[in-house]
Structures are given as structure tokens and as C-alpha cells.
């Protein structure tokens, strides 16, 4: 009994330290969720297309950048309804889709809509990282979209006809919201920078660097895209 007495202060300090660490982790988790750090679109896999946005979802990344995906997995808040106005199709990758650093109003489809006014319906067919092969597979699946289209603007990136772009994993194209916001941010933004996690997909044009968003910088990956 007497030999264990000196251990009691140490155990109390250990308990206090554990409570403090748990409190900090819980506060960080709650803070990231309240800040909207995991309020981003999720994806689904498709045997023909490869991957694309899951349909019928919307949110606001970091509580400031609104985004929406319609019933045909197009990155627009408008449900597919091609009549009665002429329909303009924007086909591409993240140059068209935008990405987490951009509000819905700042994305290409919204900009084109403002330019052409109310005379046209503008429909974006795009997902970040898509090659032309992914895009063609989507249009093959949704022939009703092609049939209703009056004009197409196609954003082509170099090498786009070589192969379909693959799904690069949950860190790049998540299939569901992460169970832990803190774990997701640590893995994607901290451990990757330290080289402790493989930086798979860093070269992809939809890989969104949370640090760039928080610091208000432009997405450098989109600046490297070639438009043709």
C-alpha cells in the first residue's frame, strides 16, 4: 500500500492530461464541422464513366462556397429540364465544374449564364479530373442530354483522349463524408505535407488544397490546364 502512494499524483496528472487532450480533440472536431470543412460534394463509382458526382446534393464548403449537383450529376443547382429554351452544353473537367475554392456563382456555367442572359439553358457536364474519355462515356450514358442540346462548348485538356481518368481514392474523390473531420484534415493537409501519407492524385486538377482556400489563394492546379 505504501509503495503505491507515490504513483497516485502521477496517475492524477495522467488523467488530467488525457482529459485535456480529449477535450482539445473534441473541440477541434466540432470546430472543423461547424466551419464546414467537410461540407463538400461526394462521388460515386460507375463501371463505364469511372467516377462522377453523386446526384442530388448541395452544400457550402467552409460556410462560404456554395455548391450543388443536380439529378444527372451535373454541377448545377438546376434540375435537368431542357425545354423550352435552347440548350448550351459545357463539357469539361474542373475548369467547368469549379471546385471547393469557388462559389457556385463563380463557376464557368454561372458566368456563361450571366453572359448569354435568359435566352439559353446552360448545362455543365463535368467532374474534376475527367479526361475526354470520361466525358464521352457520360454523354453515351445520357443520350437524352445530347439529343436536347443545341450547342456544345467542349473544354479539352492535353492527353484527354488517351484513357479514362481513374478514381484516385477517398482523399481526392470521397465516396462519403468522413467519419472524423479532424482525421480527414490531418491526413489530407498535415500528414501529406510531412510526407507521411502518399500524395496520390496531387497532380489532378480537382485536388483541392484546403490551405489555399483558407488563405484565399487561387487553385494553382486549374491554372495549368490547357483549354482547346
Image (spheres, rainbow, N blue to C red):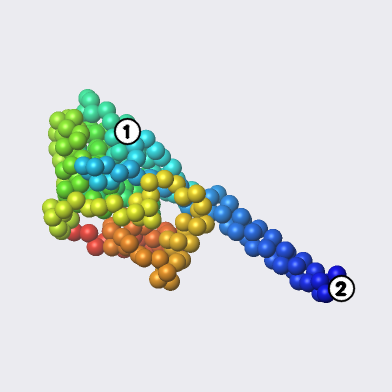
Q: Nearer the viewer, residue 25 or 57?
A: 25
Q: Is residue 228 visible?
A: no
Q: Which mark is residue 39?
A: none
Q: Position of residue 200 (x, y in %)?
A: 33, 62
What kind of element bears circle 2?
loop
- Residue 159 vertical placement versus 58 (above, below): below
Quarter of image, res 209: bottom left
Say left or right for 93 vs 146. right
132 lies left or right of 99: left
Give above or below for 147 relative to 34. Answer: above
Front position in the image: 122 or 145: 145
The residue depicted at 24 percent of the width and 37 percent of the height is: 122
Quarter containing the N terminus: bottom right
Task: Decide: few, some or many residues near mark 2? Use Cα within 10 Å; few <14, some 14-19, many ≥20.
Answer: few
Which residue was labeled with disc 1? 71
Q: Which label lies toward us, 2 or 1?
A: 2
Number of marks present in the image shown: 2
* Residue at the (38%, 49%) spot, across then down: 174
Q: Quadrant of the C terminus?
A: bottom left
Give x and y (percent) for residue 25. Answer: 60, 59
Residue reaching furthest to the top? 84
Mark 1 crowd level (few <14, some 14–19, many ≥20, 10 Å Cα): some
The residue where tag 2 is placed is 2
Locate residue 55, reporting x and y percent.
34, 37
What distance separates the C-alpha of mark 2 from that of mark 1? 71 Å
1 with respect to 89 (left or right): right
Q: Earlier in the sequence, mark 2 or mark 1?
A: 2
Residue 138, x across and y down, in percent: 21, 40
Can residue 60 be seen from the camera position used here?
yes
Q: Residue at x 18, y 42 (%)?
A: 137
Amino acid at each position: 500500500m505504501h509503495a503505491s502512494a507515490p504513483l497516485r499524483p502521477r496517475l492524477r496528472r495522467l488523467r488530467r492530461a488525457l482529459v485535456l487532450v480529449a477535450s482539445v480533440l473534441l473541440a477541434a472536431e466540432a470546430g472543423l464541422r461547424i466551419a464546414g470543412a467537410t461540407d463538400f460534394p461526394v462521388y460515386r463509382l460507375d463501371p463505364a464513366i469511372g467516377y462522377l458526382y453523386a446526384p442530388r446534393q448541395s452544400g457550402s464548403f467552409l460556410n462560404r462556397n456554395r455548391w450543388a449537383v443536380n439529378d444527372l450529376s451535373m454541377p448545377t443547382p438546376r434540375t435537368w429540364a431542357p425545354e423550352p429554351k435552347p440548350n448550351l452544353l459545357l463539357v469539361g473537367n474542373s475548369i467547368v465544374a469549379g471546385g471547393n475554392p469557388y462559389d457556385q456563382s463563380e463557376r464557368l456555367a454561372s458566368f456563361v449564364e450571366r453572359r448569354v442572359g435568359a435566352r439559353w439553358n446552360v448545362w455543365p457536364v463535368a467532374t474534376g479530373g475527367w479526361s475526354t474519355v470520361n466525358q464521352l462515356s457520360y454523354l453515351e450514358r445520357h443520350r437524352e442530354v445530347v439529343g436536347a442540346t443545341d450547342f456544345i462548348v467542349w473544354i479539352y485538356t492535353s492527353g484527354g483522349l488517351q484513357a479514362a481518368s481513374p478514381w484516385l481514392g477517398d482523399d481526392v474523390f470521397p465516396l462519403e463524408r468522413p467519419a472524423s473531420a479532424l482525421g480527414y484534415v490531418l491526413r489530407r493537409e498535415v500528414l501529406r505535407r510531412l510526407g507521411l501519407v502518399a500524395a496520390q492524385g496531387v497532380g489532378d486538377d480537382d485536388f483541392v488544397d484546403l490551405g489555399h482556400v483558407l488563405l484565399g489563394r487561387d487553385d494553382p492546379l486549374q491554372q495549368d490546364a490547357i483549354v482547346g
